[in-house]
Image (spheres, rainbow, N blue to C red):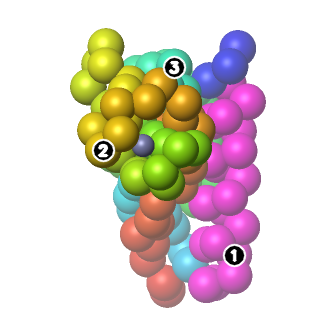
């Protein structure tokens, strides 16, 4: 059900932006998915097809971009993308980092048609 509420969000944001731009239809929605978010593209697609019926986004294609994990070392402030199993800071080798990216799922951009 995780993907369901996220897809609802994506659709709501897209429709809101389209309304602001007075668009007649939404053509494409680019979605960023963080590696750590655990979101599955295909689930989002399925829910989107279902949820977007009878909206101006019903014909929209979704494209997904996977956002790598980003960490910031609490010790020396270095920002880095870790290897899968090695989350040590490449600068000072400490394992004391904060996750600053790759957890979220968000709308990156929307292509729409304005009548
Ligand atoms: Zn460090």
Dividing the picture into quadrants, the one containing residue 109 is bottom left
Element type at mark 3: loop
From the image, tell me which residue sits under label 1. Answer: 19
Residue 107 counted in the magenta span: no
Element type at mark 1: helix
From the image, tell me which residue sits under label 2. Answer: 91
Is residue 28 depicted above or below 58 in this figure?
below
| Numbered disc in front, either 2 or 3 | 2
The secondary structure that most of the magenta stretch takes on is helix
Element type at mark 2: loop
Q: CA distance from mark 3 to mark 1?
A: 30 Å
Residue labelled 2 has its Cβ within 8 Å of some atom of ligand 1: yes
The disc, 2 or 3, on the residue closer to the chain's N-terminal end is 3
Is residue 18 depicted above or below 95 in this figure?
below
Q: Within 10 angstroms of label 1, few (less than 14), some, or many (20 or more) residues?
A: few
Q: Name the side, left or right, on which 19 lies relative to 49.
A: right
Dividing the picture into quadrants, the one containing residue 65 is top left
């Amino acid at each position: 059900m995780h993907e369901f509420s996220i897809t609802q969000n994506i659709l709501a944001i897209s429709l809101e932006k389209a309304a602001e731009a007075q668009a007649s239809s939404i053509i494409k929605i680019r979605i960023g998915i963080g590696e750590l978010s655990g979101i599955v593209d295909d689930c989002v697609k399925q829910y989107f097809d279902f949820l977007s019926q009878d909206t101006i986004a019903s014909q929209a294609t979704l494209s997904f971009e996977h956002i790598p994990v980003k960490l910031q070392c609490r010790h020396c402030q270095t920002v880095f993308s870790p290897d899968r199993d090695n989350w040590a800071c490449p600068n000072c080798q400490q394992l004391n980092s904060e996750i600053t990216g790759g957890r979220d799922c968000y709308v990156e951009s929307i292509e729409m048609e304005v009548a």
